[in-house]
Image (tube, grey):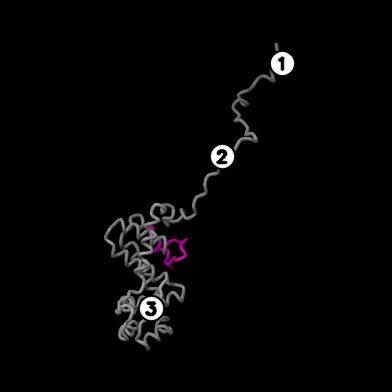
Amino acid sequence: MPTPHEAGNQHTGPEEADQPPSMSSHDVAPPAAPSRNPCCLWWCCCCSCSRNEERRRAWRASGESKLQPLPSCEVCTPSPEEVQGWAQSFDKLMHSPAGRSAFREFLRTEYSEENMLFWLACEELKAEADQHAVDEKARLIYEDYVSILSPKEVSLDSRIREGINKKMQEPSAHTFDDAQLQIYTLMHRDPYPRFLGSPAYRALLLRGAPQSSHEA
């Protein structure tokens, strides 16, 4: 018969039995949970873009090629009357392919070319009829020009941003209409008067010749 001391050593109480086993030096701690991609905190689509990356690159390349000066004489060689008309109204400038090209080149010198690129992307989106293409292009526009993580983010007020975030749940060809108008107004108010007083515009007036433009 064991002594009371031995019996006490052999007894395992319920508290001890319920204790989880301690980790030995040979055990490996479970891996830490992966940190959440910070871009997931914002609606910028980068968390699900891998499957569409090839299409995104192709669309961006297509969009950039459409912004290049066209080889036709009407676009590359604006008449003196057309160039003079750009000073009459901002609408005339923006409705002229040569005017947009010249103005875009000027915006590049002011490091605000993204405003023109955003406006042109919205114009292309509004001309799209296929809903699948609308969804894809709307997300690319958001990622490129609206997301706060983008280096090409355009300046939009909080009301416009909130409206876009709601509309992006079901994108349409007109998701960015309010934002496009705000950027159009911004370009009209700020850089347009400076463009009219710039050496580049004065040179066009004097020469009435094609602008030497090399778009990237």
Choose top left, top right, bottom left or bottom right for residue 124: bottom left
- The x and y percentages for residue 129 are 26, 60
Measured Cα–Cα span from mark 2 to mark 3: 60 Å
Residue extending furthest left?
Answer: 129
Residue at 50 percent of width and 50 percent of height = 36
- Badge nearest the viewer, 1 or 3: 3
The 10 Å Cα crowd at callout 1, few under 14, some 14 to 19, many 20 or more, is: few
- The x and y percentages for residue 38 are 49, 54
The 10 Å Cα crowd at callout 3, few under 14, some 14 to 19, many 20 or more, is: many
- Badge nearest the viewer, 2 or 3: 3
- Dot 2 or dot 3: first in sequence order is 2
Q: Is residue 153 magenta?
A: yes
Residue at 35 percent of width and 82 percent of height = 210
Residue assigned mark 2: 30
- Dot 1 or dot 3: first in sequence order is 1
Q: Which sits in the foreground, 4 or 125?
A: 125
Residue at 35 percent of width and 78 percent of height = 99
Residue at 46 percent of width and 76 percent of height = 109
Is there CB contact under 8 Å for labels 2 and 1?
no
Find the magenta span and give its range. Answer: 146-165
- Dot 2 or dot 1: first in sequence order is 1
Measured Cα–Cα span from mark 2 to mark 1: 43 Å
- The x and y percentages for residue 74 are 29, 79
Choose top left, top right, bottom left or bottom right for residue 141: bottom left
Q: Which mark is residue 4?
A: 1
The amino acid at mark 1 is Pro
The amino acid at mark 3 is Ala
